[in-house]
Image: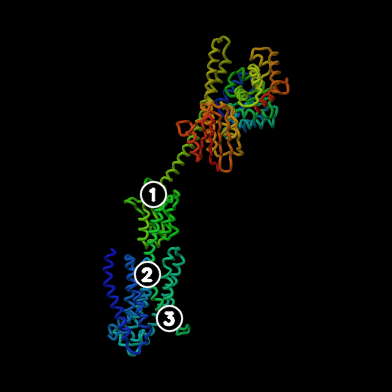
Amino acid sequence: VRVVLADDALILREGLSRLLQEAGFQIVGLASDGDELVELVDTGRPDVAIIDIRMPPTHTDEGLRAAQEIRRRWPDVGLLVLSQHVNTRYAMELLSAGTDGVGYLLKERVTDLAELASTVNRIGTGGSVLDTAVVAELVGRRRSGDNPLEELTDRELEVLALMAEGRSNRAIAERLTVTNHTVEKHVKNIFVTLRLPPSTDDHRRVLAVITYLDGR
Amino acid sequence: MRVNHRIALWPIVIAGATAAVGGAWLAAHQPEGRPTEPGLVLELVVGISLFSCGIASWRARPENRIGLVMVLTGFAWFAAELVEARQPWLYTVGLAVQSLWVIGLAYLLLSFPSGRLQGRRDRWLLSGGIGSAIGLQLLAMLYGNGAGVGCSSCVHNLIDVVHENRKAQGWLGLRDLLGVVVLLALVALLTERWRQASAPQRRAVLPVLITGFATVAALIWNVTSDLIGAPLGALPADVWFYTMATVPIAVMIVFLQRRLARGMVAGLVVELGEPSTAMDLRSALARALGDPSLQLAYWFPAEHCYVDGDGVTVAPPGADDRRGSTFVQHNGQPIALLLHDPVLEHNVELVQSVCAAASLALENERLQAELRARLVDLQASRARLVAATDAERRRIERDLHDGTQQRLVSVAMALGLLEARLPDSAGDTRPLIAEARETLTAALQELRDLTHGINPPLLVERGLGAALEELCTRAALPTHLHAELPHRLAEKVESTAYFFISEALTNAAKHSHGSEVRVTAVVSDTMLRIEVTDDGIGGASASGGSGLIGLSDRVEAVAGRMYVHSPPGRGTELHAEIPCA
């Protein structure tokens, strides 16, 4: 899998680049701001672009804008946006244009080599990844009134969160050390309780779940 | 001072009376066949008018030279009567000073009301007048006896040495010509001065100027018709006598009017005594002094300067400034500065008595003005403190983000790499590395919470609305947000509103024992209105040592206001209004 990497902090750019190389990814190029990144994507046509959200010149959400531009011009390039803050709004803005091959993670999540490798691979193959902290915030949002989430069991809530993070049934089963079949049962139950249209596709259902959570 | 002047006046009065009687006697016993131009009575009226009005003005304004000038003009007026004398030396003197009184009139008109000439042009004009009325007159007298009188029965003047009457007539013609030029210049100069004068100045000189102009115009007319024959048609000879008699009266009226103006001081004292708190001291003083342009500034001892009611520093005028100024003191301490029309400087007594009457009120106002200025300073200093705090927040957040957080992440990455490269044989090291990474992750989490509290990124990047949405979804109590924020607001307004609501939500969660909170943030043209309402136990107050006082401080620092409504048992409502125009 070919990867480009954009972060204005040299120390993180180099560190992440070493990790990615160690994990066997091919680094097509390194960028230190949004414009450089867009050029790199244009010339290098990577499978995945890994982007720090806060970059020069304004140090606000340049990474997010660059990601949206890349998605518009080269829809098949996977996007992994990294942030030092849990920012649900930015995550939703990123995912609103479609969840295929899109990820939003806190920076420290990509320090585990195995986790990094699986994340980049999932995004490279059209999957989606949403940070646990963002999902926790979405699920934990307090709104009064009718709340179908309260009808879910604790285990079902766990499965819902893992689905929102973009994990497949098999990954969920592994994580919870239960059988695939049990997970499928939970998923079905969740969709019925939340009155969501049933979806068997691991990729598609992420959108349904987070749209539901965000729209509550 | 005044007493001395009064004593000095008596000899003058006696001398004046003697001169009047002498003049009258001379006029009554004039040689036969003389052209008896003005009647005896008119002569006396003008002279006595000059004398008595001069003395009255002198008493009213002892420091002003105009009273003296009028008295001297009165003497000159009677001295001209000496031409009726039969003794040659008296006749000669009378002839020489025949027109001296016109110089007195010119001086009076030029120097009114201050009694001082106003520059070089005044002096040139007077010099021209003296040259004409005295110089050319004496020259004519050297050549002949006919100078100005030309009668057969007249005695000879003692300085008639050349005996050429025709030349004497020539000098007299030149005298009249120069006289007319000087008088015309006088009219022009006074007209120009009038056009440049302020309203109070015009009011002060108007009566004198009218009578003076009338006299000068009549004089010009007469002298001109003497010079060129009578195509103009001569005025009745005594017209200018009438007008001349009114000039001293006009001067006296103006001076006495000023004394009357001091009656305004009594009115001012009454006004100051009224319990009206909204009294405008400046207007009251302006009325008492008759100068609507009056400016009032108060002494600020700490700053060592004068400051007006709006808090603007006022510099005392320099020597060449067109404004007049008066410094007011109270118990030896400066309290105020009046900037007024320069014409008031000729009426120091009025200004002094007005200031004395108002000094207590002035001191009062001064203290209030000082207080207002201190409040303005204080407000500015609070706003600066808040701005500095906001800037510091951003700096700390940025430093943590760019420094500590990145270094910690990079350490975590290095650990990840190390873990991946560990040989299989080092199996017992792996748990240690995993532990280190978990600790690092926890540290990063804490750091993230800290920086988020210091400076929420959404507030800076997406504005108050987005930041409030996030804040309310993260709040400990279920929170409903109603926001109408169609556009970004000033940074300090947004950050004040954000931290106000954030703190209010924390308070509600900690103290209200309520079950939910409602937050409203609505912006109008000029005001951001915020409400944070809970359904808890109420009874909160901003006066205690609660967190509410901090909220109110924060809002007031940006010139906003906070209200608390918290009846026991019925929840707490916090309202804040922050100007955002």
Q: Nearer the viewer, mark 1 or mark 3?
A: 1
**Label 2 crowd (10 A; few <14 / some 14-19 / many >=20):** many
Chain of the residue where label 1 is placed in the rendered structure: B
Label 2 belongs to which residue?
A: B252
Q: Are marks 2 and 1 on the same chain?
A: yes
Q: Is residue B453 above or below residue B182?
A: above
Quadrant of the image occupied by residue A135: top right
Label 3 belongs to which residue?
A: B222
Residue B472 appears at what percent x and percent y? 58, 29
Label 1 belongs to which residue?
A: B364
Residue B371 appears at what percent x and percent y? 41, 45
Q: Secondary structure at mark 1?
A: helix
Residue type at numbered disc 2: Met
Which callout, 2 or 3, points at the residue further toward the start of the chain? 3
Q: Nearer the viewer, mark 2 or mark 3?
A: 2
Q: Are marks 1 and 3 on the same chain?
A: yes
Q: Secondary structure at mark 3?
A: helix
Residue B211 appears at what percent x and percent y? 42, 73
Of the pair A129 and B10, the residue shown nearer to us: B10
Looking at the image, can residue B193 be seen? yes
Quadrant of the image occupied by residue B188: bottom left
Which callout, 2 or 1, points at the residue further toward the start of the chain? 2
